[in-house]
Amino acid sequence: MDNKGDRKKVIVIGGGISGMTSAIYLLDNGYDVELYEKHSITGGECTSWKRSGVEIDGCAHWIIGVNKYSNFYPIWNHLGAIDENTKIHLTDYFTKIYYPDGEVVTVYADLKKFEEELIRVAPEDKKMIKKVIRGIKGYQHVDVPTKKPLRYYNIFELIHFGLKFVPMLPYYLKYKHMDGKQFCEYFKSEKLRYLFRNVLKSNYNVHSFFYIMHALTLHDAGVIEGGSLQFAKNMEANVLSKGGKIFTNSEISKILVDNNHKVIGIRLKNGEERLSDYVVASADVHHVLYDLLENKYTEDYFKKRFADYETYPLNTAVLVVYKITKNISDKARMMVVDAHDLYIGPEKIDRLSMRNHSYTKKDENEPTTVSLLIPVQDEVYDYFKQFTTKKDYLEAKRQVGLSVKEYVKDYFELTDDDLELIDVTTPLTYERYLNAYRGSYMSYISTKSGKGLMRSGVVKGLKNFMLTGQWLMSPGGLPIAVFTGKHAAYEICHQDKKKFICKEKKYPELSLKKKRKLYS
Ligand SMILES: Cc1cc2nc3c(=O)[nH]c(=O)nc-3n(C[C@H](O)[C@H](O)[C@H](O)COP(=O)(O)OP(=O)(O)OC[C@H]3O[C@@H](n4cnc5c(N)ncnc54)[C@H](O)[C@@H]3O)c2cc1C
């Protein structure tokens, strides 16, 4: 082992948000860190790229924790992802729902406005609307164990943590086991059923809607100036400044385990081996367990999930992006529109969520993009996989772009000259760049019957090894990536019998009452 003095070495597999988070907290705690990333840049899914002279943001619609009073903010700040000077783009609304008859209903981030908007559309549902608002208020109490893994909470910390959840609990218990379809049935008004059908996919549990709304209503969900790539780059700079080593274009093919089931290092795809005291794996969990660990340590928890797509569907998507040369700054930033006769492979798409990126423009005359992240079922992976030639695959992508283009033209009032299809990513893109299992860009979809418990990242029977990343809790996303990344560092310190040193800055706390007053 090439340890310097008594400093232990940790190898981190994957340079996404969770991997870089682990690296930073491990460096803080006196470990030498080597991070190996398959791609030529770090960031993983949290990334952007250029096409046709414009930037495509391939990730963040909402980063939760952008508000300095939230419990995620000190972490993002410590990681260097955001600081007090970072410009945050918040939004006044979650989305705007465009009805076929031309009506537009806004899902406002301001709860009073949202309530008024819903009552305007459906006064007959006033009672249920008030329940929805109370539900979101209940969710505003949500707390996530960002400080350390829950299993290291002492009894007093657990009680304190549990008590915070009390106002949210009745709603959580109810909505966790209810899907979008059932939720719609609570409303008499067809207009509101339509609204919630378009906000929630029918098999998603309703919890996800309340979760994102709690963050939006507390001004805690936004994107940063510079976009997803800048966010990741800020973290990379921090890893390097703390002395971490980052190796890009370095794909790992095997995790080395000795006869005592102790992880001792990794083998790179080029055959070179690197030894370490610990390995933290932040890559896609299926890839880690089934490929890198050769299915020798796959726990029942993950086996069950990967064998039951009905209860635990994989979260995959197609992203379609257009460059727009006309000024569309006056149009909505997020909107959901009806789709008809639109198919991606075998799947009928009945709604499209469009994102207008004009808010990032520095100059009114510069071109912008409109992107559509279209959640699709797992079968769409097989559809794209069937093409044996690159030409056929590219043509299938182009066809998706052409069909969707008509909707973009229609809703943004554009002619053919105003827009250009510049990219279509498919589940195969996520597989190719990230080793994402069947192209799943997030973890399992949170369905009404799925169990969403958080995993610790410890793999039974395997020593000196931690899993981290979005697969440890469905439905994934940046918040899960970041706190599981921190937890992995905590676990390693614990295994080494070291006190975990947390160098996060302390921010003043604000009561929920004050936050509500501030943001309404
Ligand atoms: C289009 C899109 C929109 C999204 N929008 C949001 C949003 O609005 N809000 C939100 O919170 N989340 C969003 N997400 C999800 C979010 O980006 C992810 O949850 C998060 O970035 C996952 O981080 P991670 O570190 O767990 O995994 P990854 O980002 O997958 O990182 C794992 C890393 O491991 C590397 N790797 C894999 N195999 C190997 C190997 N064998 N050797 C070396 N390296 C390897 C990969 O290349 C990757 O860099 C979005 C994702 C996408 C794709």
Image (spheres, rainbow, N blue to C red):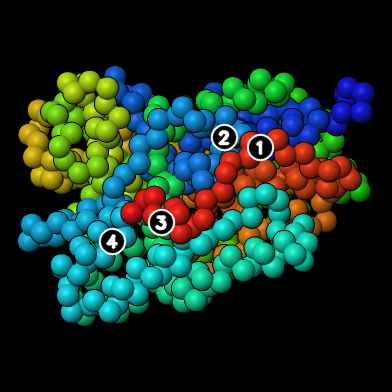
Where does residue 84 sit, x and y in percent of width and height? 49, 30
**Which dot, 3 or 1, sits closer to the camera?**
3
Instruction: Give me the residue at 88% from left, 22% from top.
Output: 4
Where does residue 280 sit, x and y in percent of width and height? 72, 40
Mark 4–mark 2 contact, CB under 8 Å?
no
The image quadrant of residue 379 is bottom left
Mark 3 or 2, nearer chain start:
2
Bin the neighbour count of mark 4 within 10 Å (Cα to Cα): few under 14, some 14-19, many 20 and up. Answer: few
Bin the neighbour count of mark 2 within 10 Å (Cα to Cα): few under 14, some 14-19, many 20 and up. Answer: some
Q: Amino acid at mark 3?
A: Arg
Mark 3–mark 2 contact, CB under 8 Å?
no
Q: Which mark is residue 112?
A: 4
Q: Secondary structure at mark 2?
A: helix
Q: How many angstroms separate mark 3 from mark 2 (CA)?
A: 23 Å
Q: Which mark is residue 504?
A: 1
Instruction: Give me the residue at 31% from left, 60% from top.
Output: 111
Q: How many angstroms separate mark 4 from mark 2 (CA)?
A: 31 Å
Q: Secondary structure at mark 1?
A: loop
Where does residue 39 sit, x and y in percent of width and height? 55, 28
Q: How many angstroms separate mark 3 from mark 1 (CA)?
A: 25 Å
The image quadrant of residue 496 is top right
Quarter of the figure with the C terminus: bottom left
Q: Is mark 1 within 8 Å of ligand 1?
A: no
